Image (cartoon, grey):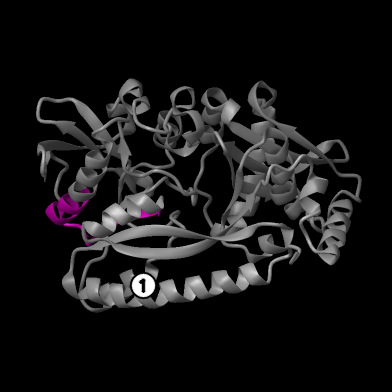
Amino acid sequence: MSNASDVGATSADGGYAVRVVSSISEFGRDDWNALSGTSRADAGSSYNPFISFDFLSILEESGCAVRKTGWQGHHLRLETADGTFLGALACYAKSHSQGEYVFDHGWADAFERAGGRYYPKLQASIPFTPATGPRLLAVPGATAPATKAALATALRSVAEGVGVSSAHVTFAETDEVDILEGTGFLRRTDQQFHFFNEDFGSYDDFLGTLASRKRKALKKERREALADGISIERLTGKDITEAHWDDFFAFYMDTGGRKWGRPYLTRTFFSLIGERMADDVLLVMARRGGRYIAGAINFIGSDTLYGRNWGCIEDHPFLHFEVCYHQAIDFAIERKLRVVEAGAQGEHKLARGYRPVTTQSAHYIVHPGLRRAVAEYLERERREVAQIGEYLEEHGPFRRD
């Protein structure tokens, strides 16, 4: 892969300068916060904590998303010819496909068996975060649509110019995938399960939308989750201490080590999140016998609660569901948040009132032969995802009336 450098992208309105930079810190906080949705103070109803300057810089500063871990910053900065900042794309040169949640291992294996070299590749995403959000980031205003189109074109040009096999934009918003598809990217769909708050006044109001049998099952499940003397605490802001992060990190390492082999996030990451983003965090902790035994971390957007990591050091029936899903619904209703995104995969969420939702990504494959093969595969996969989504929606726990 060649070194990062300035590349050119052209629009109908004239030339753009696109620079590739190795760290989010090279943008500067003020420039980054000028982008739509990146700052709670300026974003209004569209704030997404994962595209904030703090979150992305913490991933780098804590050693989570760096060259050593296979996440070399390769971020795109778009400017006018005279240097006016217009937009950005958080992007990484990857030497593997870990921590992405949109799986392309089969593509890599097939290409390498055919004599190709799949890695390195470019990954435009939020590391270790399967949450939908903006990827083509633009300064708000009349130029924003052209900026997003220019970023899509620039990403393709960079992929072709630096010697990678492909560029991937994952968990993107639908309008952005439309733009990327028009630039030659391939559309891919997958499925998650989200809770939608229909202006519920309480958890009981939500239960009222479920079939009687499902209501009874969830009430029993929540009772049994706390039956062994377990209590739940919800912490946010200044109430979260380093001692809480110590306990939560122990849960994360224990469960993450069994699930992934090597957890992605460092202890420093959580300290920095607590220092700079505590108001964006909901930490749900379960206590038994005078000590914490399990917990889940969530991030709070302007209208969405994003469930992220869970861990435990004791196993109790239904405790995972209580800490991760039911408590998230309680919090969303209390805070009048519109959506709970509970992370990747998990059809078990359906029975707990989460609905199937289609997620989208876009993929540019440089090699024509691999691109054709992937395009054919994705066409079949999209049909299957749509069919499964329709089936799951039809067989959900909600009342039919």
At horizontal 19% and vertical 64% (from top left) the residue drawn is 366
Question: Seen in the image, is 370 located left or right of residue 29?
Answer: left
Question: Seen in the image, is 74 located left or right of residue 327?
Answer: left
Q: Tag 1: residue type?
A: Leu
Q: Is residue 112 above or below residue 83?
A: below
Q: Quadrant of residue 337?
A: top right
Q: Nearer the viewer, residue 152 or 44?
A: 44
Give SS at disc 1: helix
At horizontal 66% and vertical 39% (from top left) the residue drawn is 248
Q: Is residue 262 above or below residue 398?
A: above
Instruction: Give the residue at mark 1.
Output: 378
Magenta range is: 155-171
Q: Position of residue 319 (x, y in %)?
A: 78, 52
Q: Is residue 268 magenta?
A: no
Is any atom of residue 198 visible in this view?
Answer: yes
Q: Position of residue 144 (x, y in %)?
A: 27, 36
At horizontal 59% and vertical 54% (from top left) the residue drawn is 257
Q: Quadrant of residue 243?
A: top right
At horizontal 41% and vertical 35% (from top left) the residue drawn is 56
Q: Is residue 165 magenta?
A: yes
Task: Classify mark 1: residues with Cα within 10 Å, few (<14), some (14-19) or many (20+).
Answer: some
